Image (spheres, grey):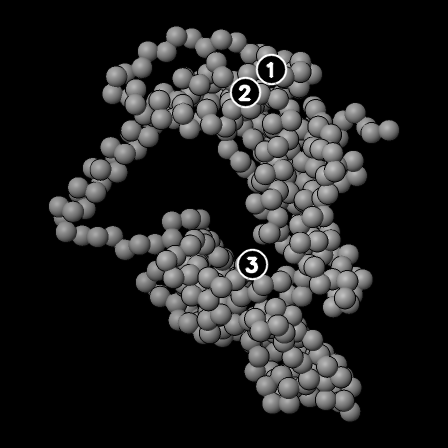
Amino acid sequence: MRKSHRNWRSFGATALTGLIGTVLFYSQPDVMADQTTVEAIKQTEDTLASGTVSSLEELAGRLRSEQEIYRILMPPDADFTLRQPCGMVFFDPKSFPDTFTAGLIGEQIYDCPVYTLILAEDPITREIVLANADGKEIAAVKPETGYNPYWYFQEQYPDLYPGLYSDAEIKALKNACDPYHIQITLTLLPTDYVTTYSKAVAEEQATAAATATKTSKFSAGGGISPMMMYQGPAVSDLTLVGIERATNGMKLTLAYPSDYTNRVDFFTCPDLIGFWWNLGLSATNVNSSTNWIEWTDVNATAQTVRFYAAGNADLDSDGDGLTDAKEKYMYHTSSITNDTDGDGLSDYEEVINLHTDPNNNDTNKPNVWISYPANGSRKVWLP
């Protein structure tokens, strides 16, 4: 028998501060909109109205849609769960069960009551569980008839059964593709508060736009254009902070500490299960006058799935001639000992000169490695 309450805090939910006591739904006060903001208010209302939901099933459908979008980006880690914020939706409390609305926990934004909702898939029953901001289950929606949680897994890996993967790899792949690893959060806004909320948003946007215009005019008049810098929080290590589609590929933004002066390697990978990475950009210099650099991966346009990593191109902790980053991503060797397999041959000697397996200490067999298919998405060592 399914427990009546499940707590989703174990997945790292962050509870919002709720209203003390019971949840109240009440009608909004009259709103007097300034004529200059009417158009902006209407635009905001129309945008939010496109996300109106009227049933628990429609809310559950939001999770299913987001699972399809984000499943391809999920790292193959059994302990990792993505909690993806998915914006605001309108709802009429009267259209939902009393047990659901009574369980919601609210807060005030722009003098409007809003409610955080967590949606997650139960890996056993496959129900869509709806939980409040404290992670307490307040409703559940049964899976649709014929639901197959592994359709994506079967579609992405049709070559599993001819024997290219071990049983352990198949199990790991199946778990990595399981949609229950993807959760979402929604912010519910009662329909009675659409105009109040939209007016506040429109006024805030108008103020921001006016400020930006003044700043732009000041900069143009002075003839000085400020240097572009990464505007996020300070980083203590190499950190990929941005990725966006460019006309000729995929553009990545890498931030680094203000005192970082070494070169950087960029790595790409099409399959995190195998975890064999290719060198995308080798030993590029950073700009000491900024704390970020950009790289456009022009080879990304031909790829369906592409993962990225960056590493210090001048750090070689064990002094074997292979950088720590390349040992981790490309060769799977140790960065703290120069002879990972202990066969008397350094990792550098095996990888660069002999082309043998640095993780196999049998020196009597020239274990060479090949990559396949053409894009190198998988590598194997051949005895």
What residue is at 58 percent from the left and 73 percent from the top?
374
What residue is at 29 percent from the left and 29 percent from the top?
207
Marks 1/2: CA–CA distance: 8 Å
What residue is at 60 percent from the left and 52 percent from the top?
72
**Residue at mark 1:** 95
**Picture coordinates of residue 229, whole percent (x, y):** 34, 54
Would you say residue 21 is visible in this rendering?
A: no
Q: Do the residues labelled 3 and 2 touch (CB within 8 Å)?
A: no
**Residue at mark 3:** 305
Would you call the spot at circle 3 few (<14 residues within 10 Å), some (14-19), or many (20 or more)?
Answer: few
Tell me: residue 263, above or below residue 167.
below
Would you say residue 206 is visible in this rendering?
A: yes
What residue is at 45 percent from the left and 74 percent from the top?
283
Q: Do the residues labelled 1 and 3 touch (CB within 8 Å)?
A: no
Marks 1/3: CA–CA distance: 41 Å
**Residue at mark 2:** 91
Looking at the picture, which amino acid does disc 3 mark?
A: Val
Secondary structure at badge 2 equals strand
Q: Which of marks 1 and 3 is nearer the N terminus?
A: 1
As drawn, the residue found furthest toward the bottom would be 364
Q: Are marks 1 and 2 in contact (CB under 8 Å)?
A: yes
**Picture coordinates of residue 32, whole percent (x, y):** 33, 11
Looking at the picture, which amino acid does disc 2 mark?
A: Phe
Of 68 and 36, the residue lying toward us: 68
In the rendered image, which quarter contains the N terminus? top right
| Position of residue 219 in the picture relative to residue 24 (left or right) | left
Name the quadrant containing residue 197. Answer: top left
Secondary structure at badge 1 equals helix
**Picture coordinates of residue 254, whole percent (x, y):** 44, 59
